Amino acid sequence: MKTLEDQALEDESGYQEDEESFFQDIELLQKHGINAADIKKLKSVGICTVKGIQMTTRRALCNVKGLSEAKVDKIKEAAGKLMICGFQAASEYSIKRKQVFHITTGSLEFDKLLGGGVESMAITEAFGEFRTGKTQLSHTLCVTAQLPGEYGYPGGKVIFIDSENTFRPERLKDIADRFSVDHEAVLDNVLYARAYTSEHQMELLDFVAAKFHEEGGVFKLLIIDSIMALFRVDFSGRGELAERQQKLAQMLSRLQKISEEYNVAVFVTNQMTADPGAGMTFQADPKKPIGGHVLAHASTTRISLRKGRAELRIAKIFDSPDMPENEATFAITAGGISDAKD
């Protein structure tokens, strides 16, 4: 009879095999007549997989320095031979969805609300006023993503893009103590980047894609805290709103593609703004998340955070394709996000 340890080892090795075969390397195009120099050009803009080519428009590929229209057509044709991108039965897609994993938030109540935790192959957005626990949740996820979890989830590395200068490595040490994990190991497994402009934030995503490709299956989570802060600064007034939303849509599209391409979870935080028109409609809460409809439609799951009494916070499912609208109470402790004590 198999012991539980044997079963766990089998599950984990099966999980790793799935991870390795999750994406097709762009180098495979060489067998279809694409030269190494052109492949290098594609990699320089963060396109490292065959799926990445299919996720990029011909026009965007033509903008890559050194790629002519004829070359782009040839690359697209070669990618089409390697990967059929048509319809598939829902049963087949259901098998693919089994590769989705969940990262625990540190609170059982919160995990239950999200259907197991922060989901991979999706963008999870948490919005709320200041002091509602957005950054604390980000820090807790940095540690919990590294811990082995349910259904053979092996744990993995994290990339943290910080636009508000709120990342604190010493905070990760406190959270690591709660889970009895080595401080240095936790910090070594988090790659940190400080973004200074919305353009810089977009450029960092090219690096992220290259890193996910370079260490296939090693990275499990990408955190951006916060997604809108720099857009708010770089684009001001109604005159620049259309351009801001267009640039934001491009970034969110890139994030969605990265999460699907490499099977990683994407967690972003967002700020709030006062809604001047809300007073006319007698809304209970006259504040709303920034980013408008573009961000609302791009996020797979949206969580609204609000303050409770003392260290308690309330999370509510604002929008989700598969979870009902519900609430959960959690606490912010020295060890990060945890269950609220009665």
Image (cartoon, rainbow, N blue to C red):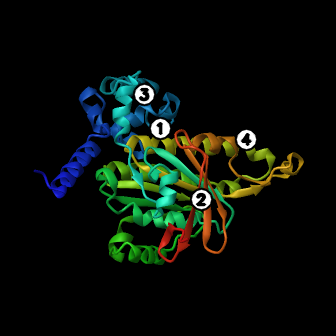
Q: Is residue 270 visible?
A: no
**Residue 34 position within the rendered picture, expressed as x and y whole percent measured from the top left:** 31, 30
Q: Which residue is mark 1?
A: 64
Tag 4 or tag 3, which sits nearer the N-term?
3
| Of 140 and 220, the residue lying toward us | 140
Q: Secondary structure at mark 4?
A: helix
Q: Earlier in the sequence, mark 3 or mark 1?
A: 1
Gap in angstroms between the C-alphas marked 3 and 4: 30 Å
In space, the residues marked 2 and 1 are separated at their CA atoms by 29 Å
Q: Secondary structure at mark 1?
A: loop
Name the foreground residue: 46 vs 268: 268
Residue 74 in percent (x, y) is at 37, 24
Amino acid of disc 4: Ala
Q: CA distance from mark 4 to mark 2?
A: 20 Å
Disc 2: which residue: 226
Task: Give the crowd class for mark 3: few <14, some 14-19, many >=20 residues within 10 Å.
Answer: many
142 to the left or right of 251: left
Label 2: state its secondary structure.
loop
Contact? badges 1 and 4 (CB < 8 Å): no
Q: Amino acid at mark 2?
A: Ser
Contact between marks 3 and 4 (CB within 8 A): the answer is: no
Q: Which residue is mark 4?
A: 242
The correct choice, above or below, for 304 with respect to 297 in the image is below
Disc 1 crowd, CA 10 A, few/some/many (<14, 14-19, 20+): some
Q: Position of residue 182 (x, y in %)?
A: 32, 75
Residue sitting farthest toward the right:
280
The residue to which callout 3 is attached is: 72
Dot 3 amino acid type? Val
Q: Is residue 178 above or below residue 205?
A: below
Q: How much space separates mark 3 and mark 2, taking CA atoms?
A: 35 Å
Is residue 144 visible to the viewer in this orientation of the structure?
A: yes
